[in-house]
Image: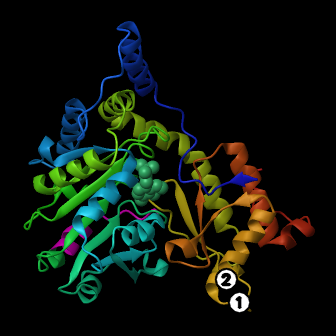
Amino acid sequence: MISLASGYGNFAVPTVAMKAAQAALATAQQQQAPLELSPAAGLPELREALVQRYRQRGATYLTADQVVVTAGAKTGLFALLSEMLQPGDDVLLPTPNWFGFYDLVRRAGGVLRTLPLAAADNYALQPETLRTALTPATRLLIISNPNNPTGRVYSRAEWAALLAVTADFPQLWVLSDEIYEGICFGPEPVPTLLALPDPHQQHVVVSGFSKSLALAGWGVGCVVAPPALAKAITARLFSTGVPVPIPAQAAALAATRAAEAIGAALCAQLRPTRQFLLDALANLPGAPTVIAPEGTYYVFADFTRFLGPALPAPEASAQLVQQLAAAGVAVVDGATCGAPGFVRLSYAVAEDDMRQALKRLIAVLSPSYVAEGRSTPMAHIS
Ligand SMILES: Cc1ncc(COP(=O)(O)O)c(C=O)c1O
């Protein structure tokens, strides 16, 4: 089985991060001492480095008391949702979106309401559409930018137009999950919500080190929130877990300081597999014009034309994913992200795996090419 389904890339641990973690461990060994314990909110140096990085990206007024280091983005999200939501609170999620939000919101007591966006419109979220979807009772709007699974990047201008709407809803929190921020192929860097005006002090950003900084498995993330909420999140984490181990935070600190270089190296590594995948999809029978996603290492491919007609869309979508799995390619069913008939394909895989996976995928989706020995949609890459 070749997996194009994983949410984590095939990236080597950045050398600076590995060395920093090794140095933290070596210190404990040399001193024959226990590992030091971090404060619950994270190492002050890491929180300060995150502030500096966000300031470089335009978050001029950010201070370290707004930053909490968490055991991965998921832990940060759950602590934040648990602090923010009361049972039954309305949470608006434009979809497609990361499947993880559904369970996180439910477990934190919220009730998730989706706002489906259209592929044909490149998943634009129009301000009027948002205004119509919000109610005075809506407690939280969640956006992932870049979006998992579509790869869509919402620009600063788009954010500004959306925030002109949310400003009219003072009870509303706005959460931007920016964990894929460093993986961007567009002309502009991904804007951070923290760089935009926050008139009601209701904006929150969650991020992590497992994607854009190649620290999958190290269990480090962060939440940036107004000081009172950051404090409440820290208190909750103190009561319910352990601080992120210092070697992992040392690695995260080194990676934060080298974030630009790490992001650039990951994008360079991803370019060939990204292109293979986009070309192969464009050459599939009946392929709609695919807008190359600007961010993440996913393509969210529209396979609705390959669905069996006899079944309802969610079942047909699951069936297609099973067929692909039976042919040896694992993909994420778009139904789990709110879009049955689409599949999320990761290109953060080795080139050989990508070639092989695409051959298997094409054999399922356009068997006539294979059976007739015609020039296949893979001809340009094999
Ligand atoms: C949008 C998004 N947020 C958060 C996470 C969780 O990240 P972490 O591994 O840091 O918990 C993921 C993981 O796939 C994700 O895609």
137 is higher (above) or lower (below) than 83: below
Disc number placed over residue 105 in the picture, else none: none
In the rendered image, which quarter is residue 241 located in? top left
Q: Please give the residue where the numbered disc 1 appears in the rendered image.
A: 311
Q: Is residue 97 left or right of residue 163?
A: right
Determine whether label 1 and label 2 are within 8 Å by CB.
Answer: yes
How far across and down, in percent of the image, does residue 43 sit? Answer: 24, 32
Task: Give the residue displayed 39% in from the left and 42% down from the top.
Answer: 209
Q: Is residue 159 magenta?
A: yes
176 is higher (above) or lower (below) than 214: below
Q: Which residues are magenta?
A: 151-163
265 is higher (above) or lower (below) than 16: below
* Kind of element beneath mark 1: loop
In the rendered image, which quarter is residue 342 located in? bottom right
Rendered image coloring scheme: rainbow
Q: Please give the residue where the numbered disc 2 appears in the rendered image.
A: 315
The three-letter code of the residue at mark 2 reads Glu
Task: Give the residue displayed 32% in from the left and 75% down from the top.
Answer: 110
Q: Residues within 10 Å of mark 2 (few under 14, many from 20)?
A: some
Q: Which of 125/292 is in front?
A: 125
340 is higher (above) or lower (below) than 249: below
How far is the residue under mark 1 from the one under mark 2?
Answer: 6 Å
Q: Which of 295/185 is in front?
A: 295
Q: Residues within 10 Å of mark 1 (few under 14, many from 20)?
A: few
Find the residue positioned furthest to the front: 239
Query: From where the camera sits, is residue 343 visible?
Result: yes
How far across and down, in percent of the image, does residue 253 sit? Answer: 31, 31
The three-letter code of the residue at mark 1 reads Leu
Q: Is residue 281 left or right of residue 195?
A: right
